[in-house]
Amino acid sequence: MFKPFSKVSPVTTLMLVSLQAIVLISVWQVMPAGLIPSPLRIGEAFGGLITSSLLWDNVLVSLLLTLKALFFSVLITLVFSYLSVVPFFRPLAQFIVKCRYLTLTGLIFVFTLLTRDGSQLKLSLLVFGIVPFFTTSFLSVILHTNAQEFELCQTLGYGRFQRLYEVIIVGKADQVFEIVRQNFAIAWMMITMVEGLSMSEGGIGTLLIKYNKYNDLVHVMALQVVIFCLGLLFDDILGRLRHWFFPYTKL
Amino acid sequence: MTIYSKGETLLQVKDLSLTYDNKCILHDINFTIDDIIRPGMQQGQVVSLIGRSGIGKTQLFRILSGLQKPDAGQILVREGTPWALRPVHAGDMGVIFQNYYQFGWRTVEQSLMLAARQNKALTGHEGEAIGEYAAQFDLIDVLQRYPRQLSGGQQQRVSIIQQLLKGSDFLLLDEPFSGLDVCVLDKVVNLLLQVSTSHELKTLIIVSHDIATAAAISDTVFILGRQEGQEGSTIVRSIDLMERGLAWEKNVMEKKVFMDTIAEIKSRL
């Protein structure tokens, strides 16, 4: 267990994680940390939150917005990534990649002018924030395609569009799930920011802002635990979906 | 001595040369492969390109398959009726890579279907053709598996069937005997002989450094080597194994003439 590159069984891993978490939480509980609430108090607040409809109503709002944003982001990413193999469109795809250096805060006003309501504003900001990261990952996948995949197509007498379809569209379809999984955290992280722009619709971000406003650190931390758990759940669901849709990824 | 004659030219390599980073890799490669006719049977052609490691065999393999363009010269292949020679394009040759590469996201059956759909002669009968080949090559049980679930031998057979289904008369094999144990080696040899006698125009071009195995199943051997004082490789010798009575013979490896031929090949490498 303490030797480099040792292999441990899933049961041992689970025990290891549980033990480390227990030790960490115990130390946190015992050590006084000023204003930072203790794990027990956060646990109590967490228990209260998950039994209230307030949390689930807001979680639902956030989830719907995230899923909508993911859907449009994947769509846009795929279109520009597939087009990137055509030299004419490559600069456009590369520009999208560079857009990840832009800050959303500086573009809120522009997006406010371009959208009709708060709901559209939140969605478009999320999509604008996610697409550059998705595109960066997917272009990297395309760029690192094994040359033999194209060569096998050539030996089968495939034309350029057939090669694009077989190697990039079909062959990399499983990677789309992996990219969504890896970058889901970005969407989840941004949701709390964009929801603050139009608070009337609610959402987990709105809830977080409200608790922050009243310095309710216990509930802020409890909400963080909820967000963390939901993130882990989605990570797991996306991983399972990938294996289900593309069985060869399990091999 | 087996009766045979040579017919039309099926493939012609003319003045081929390749330079990489200002360094000559291949120069003045010239050879032809003719249709071999044996009365009363379908006899394809088996040609071996033999050379030491690092001599440029892979580059020649890639050029022959149309995957790489030479700096000079051309490769002409037979086409149409009446026969005419035209430059080779990627897709003209069936290519079996050394690692038997297959799409990891396709099952064996799907991979074979991709190839069968490229063959106009099989239109509407792709499934039947796949079934026949799979039965012939003992792959029925693995049709629904992915490449990663196959053994090396199964992968090789899938690659061969895939290229056969595509309908190409030419089959290029890169080091087909590399890394095989004795039992599997025998199976591969029999498999290639089976393919070579499946059609009169079927032509196998084996690129290998395994001299004895390649020569044992070939009718012609081309030796790729270096000439004194010259940079790059070329065909330094071609040996007609039919003339020597060494083609299509069982237990040919035990014959003295064969051993002498192997010694001759080794001396020219």
Image (spheres, helix red, strand yellow):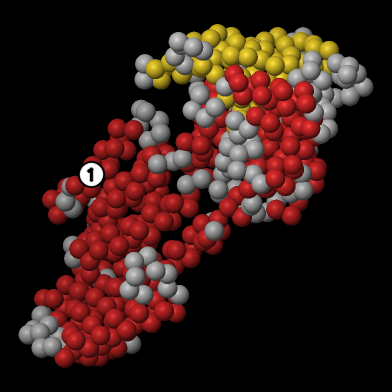
Q: Secondary structure at mark 1?
A: helix
Within the image, what quadrant is residue B80 found in?
A: top right
Residue B59 in view here:
no
Position of B148 relative to B227 (above/below) = below
Between B192 and B163, which is closer to the camera in this rendering? B192
**Marked residue chain, label 1:** A
Tag 1: residue type? Cys
Residue A85 point in image, percent of width and height:
40, 33
Relative to A54, is B249 on the left or the right?
right
Residue at 18% from the left image edge and 65% from the top image edge: A196
Relative to A148, is A48 on the left or the right?
left
Relative to A158, is B250 on the left or the right?
right
Residue at 69% from the left image edge and 33% from the top image edge: B213
Q: Quadrant of the C terminus of chain A?
A: bottom right
Residue at 57% from the left image edge and 22% from the top image edge: B269
Residue B64 point in image, percent of width and height:
58, 21
